[in-house]
Amino acid sequence: MNILIAASKLTLCCASLIVMSAAVAEEGDETTDGKVATAPDHVPDLREEKLKLKIQQRNWFVVPIPVSNPTTDTGLVLGGAYFHPQSEAEKKVQPPSVTGAGGYYSSNDSAAFAIGRQSYWSSNKWRFTGVAAYADLNLELSTPGGTTIDWFVEGDLVVAFISRKMRGKWYAGIFARYIDMHQEFGTDTSSDIFNTGVDTVSAGLGIRLERDSRDKPFNSQAGSIFELSALVNSDNLGSDDSYTTYGGNYRSYHSVSTSVVLAWELQACYKSGQPPLWDACRVDLRGFPVTDYLGRSSASGQVETRWQFHPKWAGVAFAGAGYYENSFSEIREQEAIPSYGVGLRFMVLPSQRINMRLDYARSNDSDAIYLSVAEAF
């Protein structure tokens, strides 16, 4: 995932209106009578849910989502969606198609806007996701000298993904990505590993393989999800730089008791060639801004214990570590990067176990507070 999306979940926040608020659902499994089950990966149809914050008019609705993180401070996502009508036959075999849009603004004057579409057809065998986004971010970048400099990133993103159910819970698909990015630094900046040019275009085609057996997508208590992808950015497609991105992720969830869940995650990223700095691999852990550890390769793992001590309230404790190499900052490149902390959860949508989360995390000599919707992984 490039820094445009990863930096404090800017487009991810905006696309979370399509994912969370606007029900960007992936296919639900079919039951023996042909109806779509709510598990493992069917995002709820919020038209039928009792949610105090939503504003609804028939098939339209709007939901605000508060966000806080160490990369762009405190902000608000305001998202809306339109659920496309279905026939009675379609309702029995697939989720509704959705068009959603939303904007994000934070206290450090970072802003983003995204619009997306999720479609299903052929009795839920095929799915399509398309997202177009604009972002204007004010970030801080760690430097080889151990200081920070201002990093201004502005640009457009278009992603289109189509996949087909292959067998059981396996899906395979192809996707295309186009990013037109402008970046400026607070001081003269150069790198032998990354392209730090002012204006850069990245265009590529990729493939993705996924297996998802989770019981709920936003707060899983059982099952796992495996994802593997490769993206080729080529000058033949209009990209300024030719490089390849490889990514992998595995998450697993286990119910230790009726109130305690153990969750863990492993992930890795590798970039060949000389990618743009905003498309670097990152250490995807809590306790520091996402711009602190940018490298051409990275790997991380974390484990989290979740305790539901009240029908509405839960507590979590988490710990993990990450590594990165061929970095821009060369800070602690040969050392493990720790991440640990605690958090509190309040359930805002019990039918799908969707929580509002508040986390406090530490890492080396930094700490951070996070406020968001849904679990960290």
Image (cartoon, grey):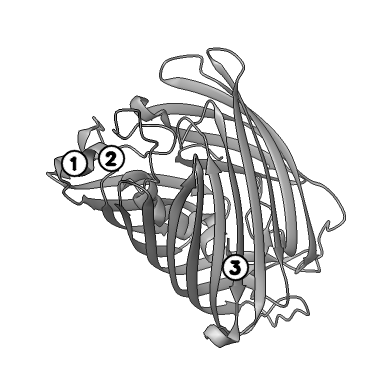
Query: Disc 3 and disc 2: Cα gap in Å?
Result: 32 Å
State the residue in front, 141 or 249.
249
Q: Secondary structure at mark 1?
A: helix
State the residue in front, 328 or 106.
328
Q: Is residue 105 left or right of residue 286?
A: left
- The crowding category of the residue bearing disc 3, from other C-alpha atoms within 10 Å (few below 14, some 14 to 19, many at least 20), is many
Q: Secondary structure at mark 2?
A: helix
Amino acid type of the residue tagged 1 in the rendering: Ala
Question: Label 2: which residue?
Answer: 93
User: Which corner quadrant of the image does residue 50 belong to?
Assistant: top left
Q: Is residue 111 left or right of residue 239?
A: left
Query: Disc 1 and disc 3: Cα gap in Å?
Result: 37 Å
Task: Judge depth for marks 3 and 2 and give the one in front.
Answer: 2
Q: Residue 276, image x and y in percent? A: 64, 76
Outermost residue, left side: 58
* Image mark for residue 89: 1
Specify whether residue 107 is in view.
Answer: no
**Mark 1 / mark 3, whichever is N-terminal:** 1
- The crowding category of the residue bearing disc 1, from other C-alpha atoms within 10 Å (few below 14, some 14 to 19, many at least 20), is few
Amino acid type of the residue tagged 2 in the rendering: Val
The reply to whether callout 2 and callout 1 are in contact (CB within 8 Å) is: yes
Q: Residue 201, image x and y in percent? A: 54, 82
Q: Quadrant of the N terminus?
A: bottom right
Specify whether residue 157 is in view.
Answer: yes
Question: Label 3: which residue?
Answer: 231
Amino acid type of the residue tagged 3 in the rendering: Leu
Q: Secondary structure at mark 3?
A: strand
